[in-house]
Amino acid sequence: MDSKYDFKEIETKWQYIWEKENTFKVSDDDTKKKFYLLEMFPYPSGDLHMGHVRNYTIGDTHARFLRMKGYNVLYPMGYDSFGLPAENAAIKSGIDPEEWTAKCITRMIQQQKKMGLSYDWSRLVITCKQEYYKWNQWIFLKFFEKGLAYKKKAPINWCPSCNTVLANEQAQNGSCWRCDNSVHVKDLEQWFFRITGYADELLDSLEKLTQWPERVKVMQKNWIGRSEGTVINFRVKGTNKGIPVFTTRPDTVYGVKFMAFAPEHPLVNDLIAHSNNKDEIGRFIHRVISEDKFKRTDKEKEGMFTGSYAVNPVNNEEIPIYIANFVLMEYGTGTIMCVPAHDQRDFEFAGKFNITIKQVILLPGGVEQPELKAAYIEEGIMINSGSFNGMKSEDARKKISDYIVENKIGNRMVHYKLRDWLISRQRYWGTPIPIIYCSKCSIVPVPEEDLPVKLPKGVKFTGKGNPLQECKEFVQCRCPKCGGPAERETDTMDTFVDSSWYFSRYCSPQHSSGPYDRKAVDHWMPVDQYIGGIEHAVLHLLYSRFFTKALRDIGIHGIDEPFVRLLCQGMVVKDGAKMSKSKGNVVSIDYITEKYGADTARLFILFASPPEMDLEWNDEGVKGAFRFLNRIWALVEKIMNNDRTHENTAEDKGLVRLMNRTIRKVTDDLAGFSFNTAVATLMEYINGIKETQDRVPAAQLREVTEKLVLLLSPFAPHIAEELWQRLGHGRLSGHAWPLYDAALIEADSVLIVIQVNGKLRSRISVAADMPEQEVKKLACDDLKIREYTDGREIKKIIYIQKKLLNIVV
């Protein structure tokens, strides 16, 4: 047996065999218990680094373990391949987006295979292929039939120089990321999915997701944002224009001292029409609207007085109206009644703009303060609130709501922060929306038999406008209803549409008469284990849940939720920052596989940190993983070259116990995704084997070593396959997971590790129930220990029962 662990030769060999033999291809086998394991599929942006690989290694290790446990494992891979990067590459380099994407996918597949990932490649799904996006269009049409897809005006970032719509991240500080010219906000007709129709179910069914991280469920609850409150109808002074305001604190309505409008609110232009600094307000509005709307609420609170006033309907007080950066159209009615005495944000804003503060709730037994140092936000007793004075604030909420409803100045309302999903994108590289516009027939859906509406070839990418709008052969068509001249919709779909049902397509990726075969989906779905980054905790997961419920109601499957269990892995960090190309701190797959091999990279990734935590890349840790694999290689080599029989040597019971304990621990850890502790257990196991290898029978040494190879295989599959073959066996990939004997784990005796000043010096076997004082005496009398203690003062002895004893001298 060659003494060298030649990882390059071994890994190339087994990757070739697995691919040639279709080792990991899965069938819809009902005789085995199914397990659907999935990682969030990647965008094909080019080379992978260890940040990507961590996600895949976690999944692959679990998949290999489950197969050995007897499960029928569906473990596929695909590529979320529409999106802006490909179009930007076309603008910058003149390369066709489809060609650029195909090259990236080919490169990624090569790298994923280099890592020994055991995907069923026969189920590959690529979302930019016509056979996939045809069904995006089919689903759109079904949603349109059900009233779940509709068109309305919505504000967008518009660059007049590039003649294109910009995402918020492309309009930083109000300037276009490409040409640096000023960005404007304008209303544009766009397509939406009515996700709000499922708000209650999306919220309520979170309680069923008992195997999701609590923080993800909280994030989704907050995003949906269900709240019960009251709509109060204020009025613009001197007009009949109403200002409906949603509030969960109607008990504070008598303390309203100003109103704040979202800059996007449709009434804003009327409010500032007669202002003396209309132009300055306009520049402020433009700047705020151009910012990321969700980030701007976390910035310093900014605002400008409009010059207009509102009238409070409960006391007829006139209150100034401001435009503020912290108010969003997505929440409530786009207006906020501001009570600085009882809301800290309002308190700080009022202080900045010298706005009067009025207290309407007091701490029980307290007195009204002439000057507040902070807002009082707790419950209390009502003051300065007319007939509601003296009530408890929690009682006043109901009473004031009753008063508002009875006097027809408002109504009770359940409100959601969730807004309908804007799916329109004014760009080429996405799924064309299957709608035709006819001057006679208006909006006409493309007939199903005419799907897919294909992206045209040879369009020009200038960076100005949507390339589809300039492609006459795409835009100009005939109306399916009247046969007259018509035009196609030139918006394409948000790429989140692609990722909202791809997991169902994997169940039957070659199905041609629908998005998927219902029988296959009802067999495999829901996904038993989903793995991906926390950054997708809201939008992707929420949209996927919405699609699953909406497609259920259309009648093409019977699944309520797409993912049973969710694992959000941490980032890979190097030099104190998340590993990324932009930071220049990536460790490439090619580098690591060339220098140490895929198995070393996998082992380090799994050992260095629990999967939910961030992982600090450490070159010394990588070297340590490589040394560990070399130790295992050397151990098997010794067995293969060892001709001793030890026929008269009794089996070592301590080693038997260690083997069974190791199998139990690694089994439990793999089931619970505790990969780091599982690897640590294997390291302890090989230490135990090496300490006894020269005195145990050859048959026992072979048995414990074979168990080591089997336990190693999910973590480092290439070296495990090679060692298993060299030990005289067939394919390890089809082998069963080793079992342990519980009766042999709890023994009459235990092995105690003895340290002197924290350094391992000996081991002794003692009765499991031996008293502590006797264990200490045996340890001190041990000949190896006496070499380090004779003639020295023993200061103390630390004993960890049944495990370790440390003598401090």
Image (cartoon, rainbow, N blue to C red):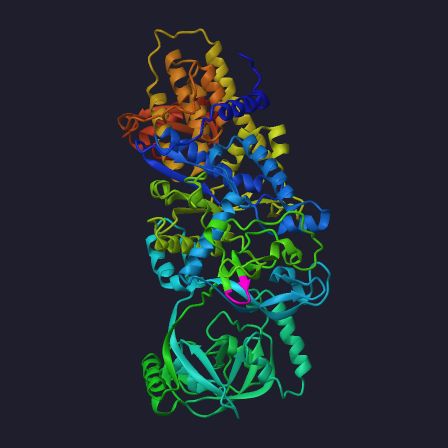
Magenta-colored stretch includes residue 439: yes
Closer to the camera in the image, 625 or 717: 717
Magenta-colored stretch includes residue 682: no
Name the residue located 48 percent from the left edge and 78 percent from the top edge: 375
Closer to the camera in the image, 342 or 287: 287
User: Eyeballing the image, is 39 above or below 230?
Assistant: above
Q: Which quadrant would residue 549 be assigned to in this image?
A: bottom left
Give x and y (percent) for residue 152: 51, 68
User: Eyeballing the image, is 258 above or below 208?
Assistant: below
Which residue is situated farthest in the front direction here?
483
Give x and y (percent) for residue 624: 55, 30
Say left or right for 627 vs 172.
Answer: left
Closer to the camera in the image, 252 or 165: 165
Residue 763 in view in this figure: yes
Give x and y (percent) for residue 581: 65, 45
Residue 363 in view in this figure: no
Give x and y (percent) for residue 272: 61, 84
Say left or right for 213 vs 187.
Answer: left
The magenta stretch is: 437-442
Q: Which quadrant would residue 353 be assigned to in this image?
A: bottom right
